[in-house]
Image (cartoon, grey):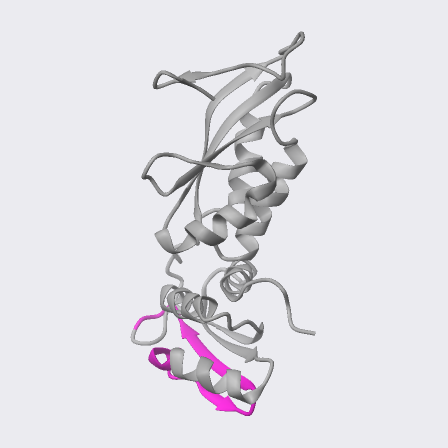
Amino acid sequence: MLSLVALVGQWWAIVRGLPEGWGEVRLRLTLQDEAQAARASALLGPANPARHGKVIWLYVSRLGGGTGPELVHRLLRQLYYERIDGELELVDVTEGAATPLEQPPPTLVEQWDAVLDELPADWSDLWAEVELTSSDYLERGALMLAPVNPARAGKRLAYRFRVARLFGYGASEEMARRCLERLDQEGITGELRILHALSDTKPVSTQGPVWYVGGKTV
């Protein structure tokens, strides 16, 4: 059975697991059928893939002069746009020059865990924002975030949502994290921010605190 995790997410998971100082990697991409593999091979053309049946081989180098990690990211996104999914596997890796690799940006779940670590232990309510890195992510991002009731932040590529730790209006901490994890699995990237945070609130006959922003309540 092919992985349900989007190919971009699979790729960055592979990158994070590579040894420091890696030079080149060989990847195997397995598609559902040969017709899908033929289309995928065409979209991956700039990476000079090799194809046999429903299996595509890719070579990625961080040494320059070849297919780099960012190019792989962009090409795999093209497969995602055409609803082509598959299983991406690391076949082998070779060491290269000891030059630092530009690390992929932190995942949204990693950002979520980091901001929670900085909050006081008794935090109770949050108003959070996820700003996406591409307008291509808006429609799919809204679907993945649906359980936290996201709201667009004007014309910006951002969604905002509330989190209630113990009770009151807002998604639970666990649900918020799960939705961000779903974005990561889809290869959707962005920046997470906590816009407002409150501690130890105790609503009485209300659903929770109200923030006034731009003359409106949120």
Residue at the farthest top position: 204
Nearest to the observer: residue 36 or residue 12? 36
Q: Looking at the image, can residue 27 be seen?
A: yes
Indicate the position of residue 103 as horizontal and vertical percent values: 43, 54
Query: Viewed as shown, does residue 91 lie left or right of 39?
Result: right
Please say if 169 is above or below 106.
Answer: above
Quarter of the image for residue 64 reads bottom left
Task: Residue 103: tell me if it is visible.
Answer: no
Q: Is residue 188 above or below residue 159?
A: below
Q: Which residues are magenta?
A: 44-64
In the rendered image, the residue lying farthest to the left is 65
How many labels sit on residues?
A: 0
Name the side, left or right, on which 38 lies relative to 99.
right
Which one is in front, 82 or 21?
82
Q: Position of residue 200 (x, y in %)?
A: 63, 12
Residue 196, magenta (yes or no): no
Q: Position of residue 57 (x, y in %)?
A: 50, 83
Residue at image coords 67%, 9%: 205
User: Residue, x 54% and y 42% (percent of image)?
Assistant: 110
Residue at (63, 44) in percent of width and height:
178
Residue shown at 63%/17% (left/top)?
A: 207
Quadrant of residue 28 within the rendered picture: bottom right
User: What is the quadrant of the N terminus in the image?
Assistant: bottom right
Q: Position of residue 208 (x, y in %)?
A: 60, 16
63 is within the stretch colored magenta:
yes
**Is 158 situated left or right of 36 in this image?**
left
Residue 47 to residue 164: above or below:
below
